[in-house]
Image (cartoon, rainbow, N blue to C red):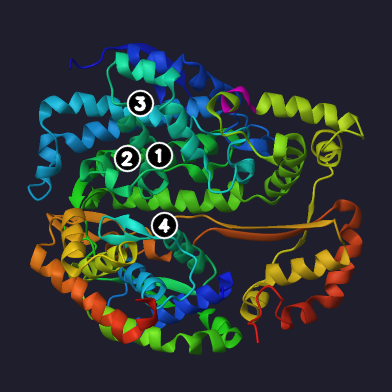
Amino acid sequence: MPAPKYEHEIRDPIHTFIRVSSDERRVIDSRPFQRLRDIHQLALTYMVYPGATHRRFEHCLGVMDLAGRVFDVIVRHPHRRDDVRQYFPADEKLPYWRTVVRMGALCHDLGHMPFSHGAEELLPEGYHHEQLSVDVILSPEMEKIWSEIPLIAKDVAKVAVGVKKWPGKKSDFSPWDELMTEIVTGDAFGVDRIDYLLRDSLHAGVAYGRFDHYRLIDTLRVLPSADPDKPGKPVIGIERGGLHAAEGLQLARYFMFEQLYFHKVRRALDIHLKAFLRAFLPDGTYPIDVNAHLKLTDDEILTAMRVAAEDSDAPGHDPARRIMKERSFYRVLYVPSADDLSKSTDPIGAVYQAAREQFPGSVARDVHNATSKPMDFAVDKDGTIVSSVAESQILGQIPTARFGYVFIIPEKLDEGRRWLQQNIRGILETPSRRTNEPE
Amino acid sequence: MSLSELQEAAVIATLIDRVAATGRFCGETLIQKSVFFLKELFHVPVSDRFQLYYYGPFSFDLSDRLQGMQADDFVKVRPHQYGATFVASERYALLQRQFPKTIEQYGREMQFVVEQLATRGVGQLEPLATALFLTREHPDASVEERARKLNAVKPHVDLPVAIQSVKQIDGWIERYAPESN
């Protein structure tokens, strides 16, 4: 298979120029990919950070560009250690895998429903957007493109979603397959993460998301796992010289979650958005049929919300008017203090339960933590493999970003605050029914 | 009977605390295998779903749960020469105070983990946990049949080790959970 020609250039605010082959251009021009122009990367975050209007479309181009760069670094012969050399395919197969990795990166978000993660829980039980990404990649519309390149569609789909979200058997993944998807979806160095931190940081105007990704990528290597529980397993790690860049990435992620992704107004907006969608969508859930999925974007939802905001009889009128017309979003009633956390296993649950009984229909809660493994990855220190947690003074100390809020509608905020002030001690000292041990 | 999310956290944090008290390395693989044994050998009602993965049964649900428990400060990781080892954290005391009966109820099962699993490396845990997985999937299959299946899904586990592992599992079921035979 000849190396692809990169005949097209797309300007990008993060990566300057993203070079694209004609085969990749076909995918970019396809209906499923063009739809990503109408899916906001950060849902309604732009109502808080006005610059955050960027879309999944450019993020996916950026992820593809970075995936190609990482692939080129890790497969270079001088970068291969003897103890993992056997996992690399023959050189003549590398152009195929490079194309697969870039295509998988390009297509990894094809399954995103309107407003990205903002209302993902409205998918039917057990479904997630990665499953939809696989469905779209394997659809007849995309299969036609893959077969003409030619690429095996399943290889692209596996790279796009990774082992954890792969709807088939985990044993479908060879060690090489796992390395390829780790380039895109990896917890420590996945290029999806690298691009979204840099891009969201730029557009939101939140500088915490920056880090030295050039240095990081240059030091990535395929290494044997440092984990004694996984002897010899090939993983993507770094040379010791890249450790500070890796620390920078993890710190950037922590701060971005705390500052941007878990912002209280954005979380309140998500709750109103979900309330609207439950009323607006048939059966209150997003469609999982590929064609129906591809027809639905942020544009349709925003238009429907505008209409519903003006019509008091329309389904979802109340959340629609709060978002589109009055900006009367939920306000924070309660955030646990360190003292509260030392007294109760679940202070948010306890306050929410009590507030819901006091103000029925007027409160909501939202609890979330940034899911990511402890940043324990392999480091090549002068030829010896060591654990990043043992080698770094910082990585083991970075807390897991977490938030928890109890919200109340603004009309009840003052009354709610007075009530909470009078009752908080009693609420926290009495374990809630949800958390109490049954007799 | 089902456990609430916090009761499950209490069981898992106690398990981690008791393994850590022995001074042994308590990495995620050991926790994964231990919780799998609690669930499938002793029928402790933890909700995490397991499937066969690189080193035997693995649960992404449990992996996510461990991160949540770190965020809640029920457990934390400490640097170790081999990597991150889990220990109970400050707020684990709240779980102990709130769920003493739940923790007491599964004391025997946790003792099994400390004595029988924490003393083994992943090289031994992998065939044992996979043998238990296959035994639950094929309850009527003979020792030989299950050992061959184990060897088929884990070719690096040779047949004699596979047979030994299946027999060990049968012995533990007989001893600890005969009603599930």
Q: Which residue is mark 3?
A: A103
Q: What residue is disc 4 on? A: B60
Which sits earlier in the primary sequence, circle 3 or circle 2? 3
Residue A224 placement (x, y as % from top left):
18, 53
Quarter location, residue B137:
bottom left
Quadrant of residue A152 in the image?
Answer: top left
**Residue on which the image places disc 1:** A161
Distance CA(mark 4)–CA(mark 2): 16 Å
Identity, as a three-letter code, of the amino acid under mark 4: Phe
The residue located at (60%, 44%) in the rendering is A124
CA gap, disc 1 to disc 4? Answer: 14 Å
Q: Is residue A176 above or below residue A56?
A: below
- Which x, y percent locates residue A334? 75, 64
| Total numbered badges shown on the rendered structure | 4
- Which residue has dot 2 on it? A181
**Circles 1 and 2: CB atoms closer than 8 Å:** yes
**Which stretch did the figure color magenta?**
A293-297
Which element is circle 3 on? Answer: helix
Q: CA distance from mark 3 to mark 1?
A: 12 Å
Image marks 3 and 1: residues in contact by CB distance under 8 Å: no
Q: Do we see residue B23 in this rendering?
A: no
Classed neighbour count for the residue bearing mark 4: other residues with Cα under 10 Å, few (<14), some (14–19), many (≥20): some
| Marks 3 & 2, CB-CB < 8 Å contact | no
